[in-house]
Image: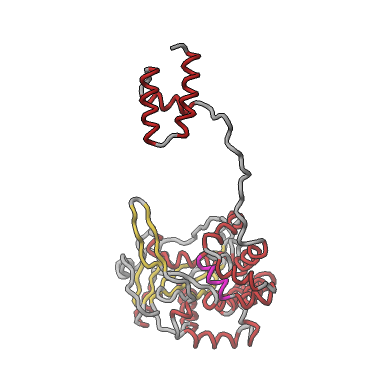
Amino acid sequence: MRLELRMEYLEKVYQRYRKASKESKGRILDELCHVCGYNRKYAIWKLSQLPLEEGPKSHPKRRRLKKYGHEVVLVVQQVWEAANYPWSVRLKEILRLWLPWIRLRHGVSRQVEEKLLSISPSTIDRCLRANKRKLRRRLYGRTKPGTLLRHKIPVKTDSWDVKRPGFMEADLVSHCGGSTQGEFIYSLNLTDIFSGWVETQAVMGKGERGILKALESISQRLAFERSGIDSDNGSEFINHHLWRYCQQQGIHFTRSRPYKKDDNAHIEQKNWTHVRKFMGWDRYDSHKALEAINDLYGHELSLLMNLFQPSVKLIRTVRTGSRKKRIYDEPQTPSIDSLPVEISIRRRLKNSKLSGKDWIPSPSLSESIRSLKTYGI
């Protein structure tokens, strides 16, 4: 059969083939292979190469209508900034907690309120994708490992089985501005593993007595007894002063493995959310700055982060093949987990610059923190 006749025959077969049922297509293919001498796979491929008589009708692509408009996204972005850039799962809970302030500040409609309460963490991530790119920065440590008393202070190789507040992780954050010359301020940061409660105290330098004094100051602000402290191997912690203090107070003092930051995962995360996000990487080396930072840590910042910033706990990790999925509990604030802290809160509210109803909307705390950073430090 000549090529022209074969192509004409193929086109006629194709018109029947494209409209036929699956069973009929098999018979058409048998006929085509018999007439043209094709292999069955080659016959299928040959038919698939023929153009349609009429091209496919082109329909304009239908875009999905946006459920969350500009007004919703704008509120989400402003609350995210006011809450100091929390994770989307926490931000969803913050939107619910801060709804009274959102009504006062933005005067949103009922429809917008419903969308703010129904928005998912994944959608929040998409709304904030461009904003997050601008906030990526690196973190540097400025402490040296301690060499004293390592044989007396045990290494904690597993997690504390805590069912009550009191077991804490401690770390030091430097405010040297990129240069370690001279004396500058450090932030001593402590977090309770059970409740997530965080307290911070600024010290000038990282001398052993200064760190001990800061620990005593933090203990007066806590509403629960300290049962254990776990730190890294820096010389500001691994020393006779702190070791004797823990022995006298009946505090179980342990240290992490050298160069294993995951051993102190709780406090490493709090260093970013409670210190670096507010203080940044600038250098602070004056006594005026020290007083202003401690005033911030002891009042507004502590109230904001412990009362109005919900956090989540990792319940378990599920492995599926080579992938891991982390399962978290519901976001809630540390004050819900640890009820005795209400005593400490009321005592500090009396000394805070915010009193009465003024402090209740948490963004008022954020605005007060920003003004203190601008004019006080």
As rendered, which of 176 and 328 lies closer to the eye?
328
Name the quarter where the N terminus is drawn: top left
Question: Where's residue 33, x and y in %?
Answer: 37, 21
Q: How is colour applied across the structure in the image?
A: secondary structure
Question: Which residue is painted at 52% across and 66% down in the image?
Answer: 273
The answer to which quarter of the image holds residue 279 is: bottom right
Question: Which residue is painted at 45% across and 86% down in the image?
Answer: 340
Question: Where's residue 199, x and y in %?
Answer: 50, 76
Q: Is 246 located above or below residue 125 in the figure? A: below
As rendered, which of 342 and 1 lies closer to the eye?
1
Q: Residue furthest top?
A: 2
Residue 377 visible to the viewer? no
In this rendering, the count of numbered labels is 0
The answer to which quarter of the image holds residue 258 is: bottom left
The answer to which quarter of the image holds residue 126 is: bottom right
Q: Is 29 located above or below residue 293 in the figure? A: above
**Is residue 144 rendered to the left or right of residue 204?**
left
Q: Which span is picked out in magenta?
A: 89-97
Q: Is residue 250 magenta?
A: no
Question: Which residue is painted at 37% across and 68% down in the image?
Answer: 315
> Overall secondary structure of the magenta stretch?
helix
As rendered, which of 98 and 84 lies closer to the eye?
98
Question: Where's residue 257, x and y in %?
Answer: 35, 62
Name the quarter where the C terminus is drawn: bottom right
Residue 214 visible to the viewer? yes
Question: Where's residue 182, x and y in %?
Answer: 57, 62
